[in-house]
Image (cartoon, helix red, strand yellow):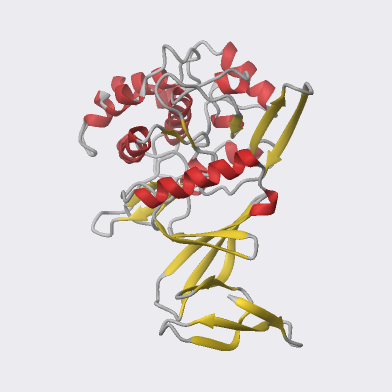
Amino acid sequence: MANREENNEGHKFTVKYVGLNGMECEGKLPRRVVGVRNHCYLLKSKIGEGSFSAVWRAEQRPPTGVDVAVKQVFLSKLNPRLKACLDCEINFLSSVNHPNIIRLLHFFQDDGCVYLVLEFCAGGNLASYIQNHGRVQQQIARKFMQQLGSGLKVLHSHDIIHRDLKPEVSPLRANKKKGKLQPISHNGLPKLHEKPFSSLIENLLVVTIILRIETSSKILFALVLLLLNQNILLSSHGVEAVLKIADFGLSRTVCPGEYAETVCGSPLYMAPEVLQFQRYDDKADMWSVGAILFELLNGYPPFNGRNNVQVLRNIRSCTCLPFSQLILSGLDPDCLDICSRLLRLNPVERLSFDEFYWHSFLQRKLMGT
């Protein structure tokens, strides 16, 4: 789009643009229309915002009846490392088409921003589901883990680590042929209003941080990024849903034998080696998967604290996973085994992706006993 000129109304502007018929047009369009050539989108409502990006619910112009999610990234706010992460995100999403990975429909650059047009998941994210309904039944947790594993298998095949897996990163998409998800409370009875512990401290701790050490000047500084909590999304509300991994803004390629060093992620779901400023590999993602599984089963994250130091202290002092006795007594042995082995302090002892993917808990049928 070009030659924008705001009129006196302040609500619309005059633009010259290329229409769907390929002809150059000029006219007044809604103020929040973005796009190039035959890809124009009306940004209807903001559904997430961070330090360097925002996500909008949008529709294509002219309307097609299908909403999309438009991620707007402000290039001027990205340092070289984050620009590399953006390149990784675009390259990866452009190359895959998988039911458990958010689909990139289109991307373009305009006015100092990169726009990623993504499929819209009406079900929100996994964190919202847990917050609204409490912990889920074991067989539902198994299905979510199967879907998460299926998506992570694609990342694994590309040697990509996500580095910010958390319930907020998992959207849900519905399969309308199936029945409703049935939440249960801590005493095993159906319940619709139980909220996870993480919702009580999300304003204190559930933020994504990047810690970078400048070795030349010996300066340590933290860049706190209030990133979009849209990492694991759900396709729809109220019915059997499909989980999708989203928000690859911190992802990067780490080949076998290589390690990453940047400290990034959300403290409640960060592996202890990351919290301790140690180098790490894809086993860090496996810790996050274990924390998500624990939260699905228990209704709140396994380790908490007011800051990352307290979270790490609680992890290191733990001798067994803090399941309530009522929940623990109802868990199958293979469920407890996979959760405890994903949350091993020592990454060498932690499940690898292949061990997680082929674990008996995930290989059992969804509704099996």
Image quadrant containing the C terminus:
top left
| In this rendering, position of residue 217 left or right of residue 235 | right
Location of residue 189 in the rendering, given as x and y in whole percent from the top left corner: 39, 40
Compared with 207, 111 (above or below) is: below
Is residue 325 something one can see in this rendering?
yes
Which one is nearer the viewer's eye here, 201 or 263? Answer: 263
Is residue 133 something one can see in this rendering?
no
Residue 74, quarter of the rendered image:
bottom right
Compared with 240, 306 (above or below) is: above
Image quadrant containing the N terminus:
bottom right
Residue drawn at the location 29% of the way across and 29% of the way down: 357
Which one is nearer the viewer's eye here, 91 or 277? Answer: 91
Location of residue 10 in the rendering, given as x and y in whole percent from the top left corner: 73, 82
Compared with 56, 337 (above or below) is: above
Which one is nearer the viewer's eye here, 265 or 336? Answer: 265
Residue drawn at the location 48% of the way across and 12% of the way down: 346
Residue 353, quarter of the rendered image:
top left
